[in-house]
Image (cartoon, rainbow, N blue to C red):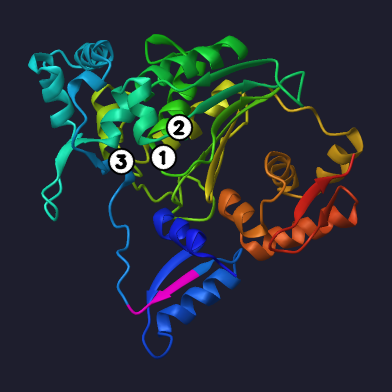
């Protein structure tokens, strides 16, 4: 039985994958039954019924207004540095001749609520350029954790806990990743470029720009012995693996994304995924990013080649067309479904299931759990 505090917490959290608000008088509406069926087909959820209208959250968390926030609450040096970032990329950038306050206002980080008349700087302004006390006052659970777990998997080999603003966190995260991963260069046109920088700039910018900051789930980037994994809470628009073919560009935090775009950290929506698919196979031959959207968005980038499968597995799998690619996908994501494999490999779900059945028959893989929540295991 839910108590009042639990119900208030759900209302504050707002609608999401497992919470829906429904208006009800004498009977349940058709949409309520549809929501219940959708929850039953997934992981369950909560339907809050009321004869009053509960305002749905159709806005963005980043747009919360704080009337008493002033320019003294921001790190002025960071706004100055952001201006330089923009001007380096465009000598005639509009920010060049703007004051720091004008930059924030032009970035839609100062708003007026037309329903209440309240106006002021927003959560986005605090997150991107705020001093640490300012960030804590608007988002007490805010924290970014960078971990290196190559040797000590129970704890960590190295760690950087960040409570600074997003502008400073961007550079600290890139420095942390550079410290623990190899660099490789390639010739882009006539210019020699760092492939590591191209890839992880995309990863870090996406990680910071598309997080749902109202949720206390810890945002984390972890470096393992051959992969870098980012995890952060989001409001998903699709469930499962994301590929260039099925991506549905949708800004989670438009003001933050717009500010990042002015500094050249992101491009148009969807370009980050295309860039990762372009550069990851160059960084590690044949490797592709693994992006999974759920309540938690996870991105996996490989920076070292995978350990080779046993010779027996290679020989047997070599006799089954597409088996090597399917084994590679399972190695990256043990919970991947046959449908998701088909989407990545441009194969029908039925075709993938036949290949999986052969691999199970040869005792190369096995499945544990249900079709919905089970996992694949490579048998060594």
State the predominant SS element of the stretch in magenta.
Answer: strand
Location of residue 307 in the rendering, given as x and y in whole percent from the top left corner? 78, 27
Looking at the figure, which quarter contains the C terminus? top right
Query: Circle 1 is placed at which residue position?
Result: 213
43 and 304: which one is in front? 43
**Mark 2 and 1 residues: CB-CB less than 8 Å, in contact?**
yes
Q: Is residue 361 left or right of residue 116?
A: right
Please indicate whether residue 139 sits to the left or right of residue 97 in the image.
right
Provide the residue span drawn in magenta: 47-51
Q: Say few, some or many: other residues with alpha carbon within 10 Å of mark 2 (under 14 / 14 to 19 / 20 or more).
A: many
Q: Which residue is found at the position 73% from the left and 23% from the top?
A: 155
Q: Is residue 27 left or right of residue 348?
A: left
Q: Earlier in the sequence, mark 2 or mark 1?
A: 2
On-image quarter of the N terminus: bottom right
- First in sequence, mark 1 or 3: give its number: 3
Magenta span includes 56: no
Between 157 and 371, the one nearer to me in the picture: 157
Q: Dot 1: few (<14), some (14–19), or many (≥20) neighbours within 10 Å?
A: many
Question: How far, Cα to Cα, is label 2 from label 3?
Answer: 13 Å
Residue 179 visible in the shown view: yes
The residue that appears at 61% across and 62% down in the rendered structure is: 348
- Report the front residue among 97 and 311: 97
**Snapshot quadrant of residue 26:** bottom left
Q: Which residue is mark 2?
A: 142
């Amino acid at each position: 039985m839910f108590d009042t505090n639990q119900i208030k917490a759900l209302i504050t959290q707002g609608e999401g994958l497992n919470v829906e608000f429904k208006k009800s008088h004498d009977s349940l509406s058709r949409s309520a039954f549809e929501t219940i069926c959708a929850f039953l087909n997934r992981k369950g959820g909560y339907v809050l019924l009321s004869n009053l209208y509960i305002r749905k959250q159709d806005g963005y968390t980043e747009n919360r207004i704080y009337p008493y926030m002033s320019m003294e609450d921001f790190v002025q040096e960071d706004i100055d540095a952001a201006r330089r970032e923009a001007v380096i990329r465009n000598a005639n950038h509009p920010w060049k001749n703007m004051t720091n306050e004008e930059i924030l206002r032009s970035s839609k980080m100062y708003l007026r609520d037309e329903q209440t008349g309240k106006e002021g700087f927003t959560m986005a302004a605090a997150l991107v350029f705020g001093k640490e006390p300012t960030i804590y006052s608007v988002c007490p659970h805010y924290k970014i954790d960078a971990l290196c777990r190559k040797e000590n998997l129970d704890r960590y080999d190295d760690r950087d806990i960040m409570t600074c603003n997003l502008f400073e966190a961007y550079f600290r995260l890139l420095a942390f990743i550079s410290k623990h991963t190899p660099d490789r260069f390639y010739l882009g046109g006539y210019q020699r470029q760092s492939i590591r920088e191209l890839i992880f700039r995309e990863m870090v910018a996406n990680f910071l720009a598309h997080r749902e900051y109202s949720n206390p789930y810890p945002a984390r980037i972890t470096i393992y012995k051959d992969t870098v994994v980012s995890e952060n809470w989001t409001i998903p628009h699709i469930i499962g693996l994301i590929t260039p073919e099925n991506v549905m560009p949708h800004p989670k935090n438009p003001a933050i994304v717009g500010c990042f775009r002015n500094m050249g950290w992101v491009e148009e929506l969807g370009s980050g995924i295309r860039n990762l698919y372009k550069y990851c196979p160059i960084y590690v031959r044949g490797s592709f990013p693994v992006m999974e959207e759920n309540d938690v968005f996870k991105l996996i980038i490989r920076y070292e080649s995978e350990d080779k499968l046993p010779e027996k597995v290679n020989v047997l799998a070599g006799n089954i067309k597409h088996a090597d690619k399917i084994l590679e996908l399972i190695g990256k994501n043990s919970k991947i479904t046959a449908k998701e494999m088909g989407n990545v490999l441009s194969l029908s779900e039925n075709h993938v299931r036949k290949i999986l059945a052969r691999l199970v028959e040869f005792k190369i893989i096995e499945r544990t759990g249900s079709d919905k929540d089970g996992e694949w295991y490579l048998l060594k």
